[in-house]
Image (tube, coloured by chain):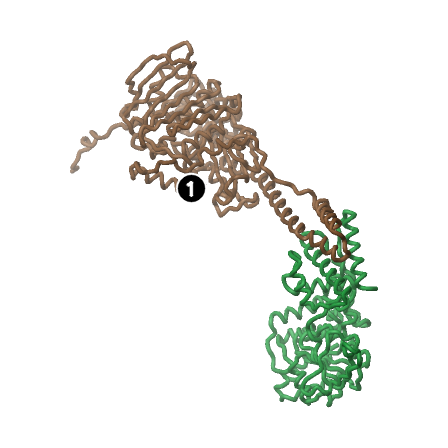
Chain colours: A green, B brown
Amino acid sequence: MNVGKKIKEIGEKVYKTILKKKQPELKMPLRSLSNVKYDPKDGYFELLGKMKVRALTASMVKTFAQTLKMMALSKDLIEKDDMATKREAYYVSKNWGEARFKEQPESDGIMDDVEGMMMVNREQLGFIPEEKGGEVAGKLIVIDQDPDTKKEIRIDCTKFGSGAYSIPSSVEHLKFETNAKFILAIETAGMFQRLVKHKYWKKANCILVSMGGVPTRALRRFIRRLSDAKKLPVYVFTDGDPYGYFNIYRTLKVGSGRAAHINQYFCVPRAKFIGITPQDIVDYKLPTHTLKDVDIKRAKDAVKNDPFVQYHKEWQRAIKQLVGMKVRAEQQALAKWGLNYVIEKYLPQKLKNQKTWLP
Amino acid sequence: MLKVHAKELAKKQREISVAEFFEKNRHLLGFDNPRKSLLTTIKEAVDNSLDAAEEARVLPEISVEIVELSETRFKITIEDNGPGIVRAQIPKIFAKLLYGSKFHKLSQSRGQQGIGISAAVLYSQLTTGKPTLITSKTDPKKKAHQFTLKINTKTNEPQIIKDDQIEWKNKDHGIKIEMELEGAYFKGKQSVDEYIKETAITNPHTTIIYTNPLAEQIIFARATEELPVEPKEIKPHPYGVELGILIKMLQSTKARTLQSFLQTDFSRVGPGTAKEICQNAKLLPKSRPKTISRDMTEQLYKGIQATKIISPPTNCLSPIGAELLEKGLRKEINAEFYCSVTRSPSVYRGNPFLIEVGLAYGGEQDKEGTIRLLRYANRVPLIYQPGACAITQAVQQIAWNPYGLSQSKRSLPVGPLTLVVHMASVWVPFTSESKEAIAHYPEIIKDIKLAVRECGRQLGIFINKKRRIHAESKKRSYIETYIPHISEALHELIGIKKTEKEKVEKLLFQILEKHRGKLEKIEMDNPDYDEEIAKIGKEETREGKKPSVSQKPKVSEKPKKEDKQTKLKE
């Protein structure tokens, strides 16, 4: 259905409720880990169906008004076939008087609510993120279009030298050509650069993706489409700490609680975690740092509230081991054994031995 | 060898008369400084007038006039419409200390010791050297007697300077007192103005015509034509009698046997109880009272304590009544909430008493300072020594936070509250002869606390309700802020027009009202409020008159200290 029409319908419903002198409401899915379930058959966090309601109460009236205003803004963008970045949407609200947002996270949250209410992604609402989708290097040809002429553009990701191809914020129109064996998604830009510099992609016949922290939606969608289209396995390589495991790897693989309504499209169920695992810290005698309080809290929260961790015993054991050791290790700690140890020893060994992976 | 023989010393040893004693210790009677002395003098005269009029079942009408002769010298005239005093008694009542009608009987009255007015006469004499003029008329058809009196301090006997009969026209009966004294007149707390006002509030059956030194005349007209219930005189309860008094009573009784002495001279002792007391005291009921020795009296005293005797009758008490108490408060304070309670009587040391409490909260009262506590004993306002008083202590011991007032530990709570506590008793236990503070009997403190808490609970309910309403109105106005944004968003979303937008806003307000209920309002509704009365006693100092300029520094030192103290506590 046309999103603009759907937004108007919700507006009409609110209006009619008011005319009937009844308390108007807006209902939307609750966006949190407590409202998702994990089933490996589907491969991503699915909504459980808990709803939240916004109405005319002291605690909700402001967000009620803001949600309606955000919907109006979206309708306007769709009708004019325009786009606004999340940041721009936040600045637009500065003209809403008392209903304006104080900080951007507030407007991002309302935007996510509208998404959830419509069960569409924000691009369909006319909003685009300002962040880039991550970088790609290796054996891949991306087929894009010229924005004006719609002529095909072929981008060879082996030809960026010491640089890389930048994933655009919208990836739905991209096509791919590759004969690579797998995709390697890397947490830090530093490690990515080392692998690019030494053309690891050539040696291992793979596609390298730099996530640069928590993977953006565009990056998740990019890897998902690429791996689906070419039936490529996806291996994930992060720091050995709870942030790397859950905020990065788990989000890439099954999505997040906050955006559960669109996880279906923004997840990579076939991703596997190859390192750095807690056992790697032991096996490779890696130099470590002490776990911070926030790391320990994150680990405990994951065991307690994360349906993905609750499903996988291996992850529970891994966390137990890490918290027991009270340490974390960065990807680049492998440099202890030589700068190229990661290329020559670590990755080949890990890729060969599936038993050292985590699901 | 002794250097000075006891015989020499004996020449200097002689009896001290009570008048001489108080001449030197006048602070014990409330004459510590000029300002307080003026108040005490007026207070003693007004108390007596009220007592006399009530006893004669006349609606009291009292006129008080203070004329300033110089900055430190005042002439005061107090006139009442009481029964008057017969000629023979006038000199002793006004010019002999410890002479009176109230000391030997147990009944609720303002005066109780027979010191007050004669002490005022003594003070006047001490500070001005002048006698006091008393005029008394007891019968409309007869002439009035007029005495000019002084006190012989060596003998504590009246010294009659003049004894006249005069024509007192347009007067049926009453007393007039005229005297000069050294004093100081200020307005504000602890002033004569304040005392007169507080007296008028708790004695609504009284008319007081008051003329202050600024020649401002204020008439406090009576609010009710009903005299308070006549307090009944009762005999002492056995539990309240101490050994010394018991000895005296045994000597002066008219009863012929111990048993009949117990039955006739005490309340609540019938033949059964009397026999039981004798049994417990191991004394024969037939013994003659006059033959009972000191040791036997002690046996009797212990016997009384060992016997269960029912509490004294309480119909001897005459409360102001919760309703009148509240009415008085309404006159003086424009508040949001009033309540009052009269407790049923209790007993301390064999003396029946009862506590009444009234309070007024909010409105135009000060929110920052500690509460205003007004203390009364037998309808007499207690102005000085709040810190030493059982009432203050009881109020401080109560935890006020549950009732919605903040309070630092062991002090008076903070908030816009006036609290009135009244103790009525046949014998109010004052801490000193100047009758400024009630002694700390646990039974009294307990009853005060119970009464204050009872009012406190109602106050707490009110304050909670007020807070709830305040929070609700804040929430509501917050919600209302966003109503225009909702209609604006609907305008943008589905293109509703300006008139429809207005309709949406109106409907949203209605939905809000329906959903959250009508917002209650707290308003002051107080037709009894009298602004003129409320003002009295609130002006801090007298206009155009600098305090303490002409006062002797030594005298003014003490009151200053005390003022500070009371300010801290009030």
Using the image as rendered, state which of residue B435 and residue B217 is in the foreground. Answer: B217
Give the residue number, with chain letter if any, for mark 1. Answer: B567
Left/right of residue A116 with respect to residue B12 in the rendered view? right
User: Which quadrant does the C terminus of chain B fall into?
Assistant: top left
User: Which quadrant does the N terminus of chain B fall into?
Assistant: top left
Mark 1 surroundings within 10 Å by alpha-carbon count, few (fewer than 14), some (14 through 19), many (20 or more) = few
Left/right of residue B455 with respect to residue A316 in the rendered view? left
* Chain of the residue displaying label 1: B
Using the image as rendered, state which of residue B246 and residue B221 is in the foreground. Answer: B221
Q: Is residue B407 above or below residue B261?
A: below
Residue B527 percent across, percent down from the top left? 57, 31
Q: Judging from the image, what secondary structure is the residue with disc 1 in?
A: helix
Q: Is residue B407 visible?
A: yes
Residue A88 percent across, percent down from the top left? 68, 67
Residue type pointed to by label 1: Lys
Residue B394 percent across, percent down from the top left? 49, 39
Rendered image quadrant of residue B337: top right
Residue A303 percent across, percent down from the top left? 70, 69
Q: Is residue B303 visible?
A: no
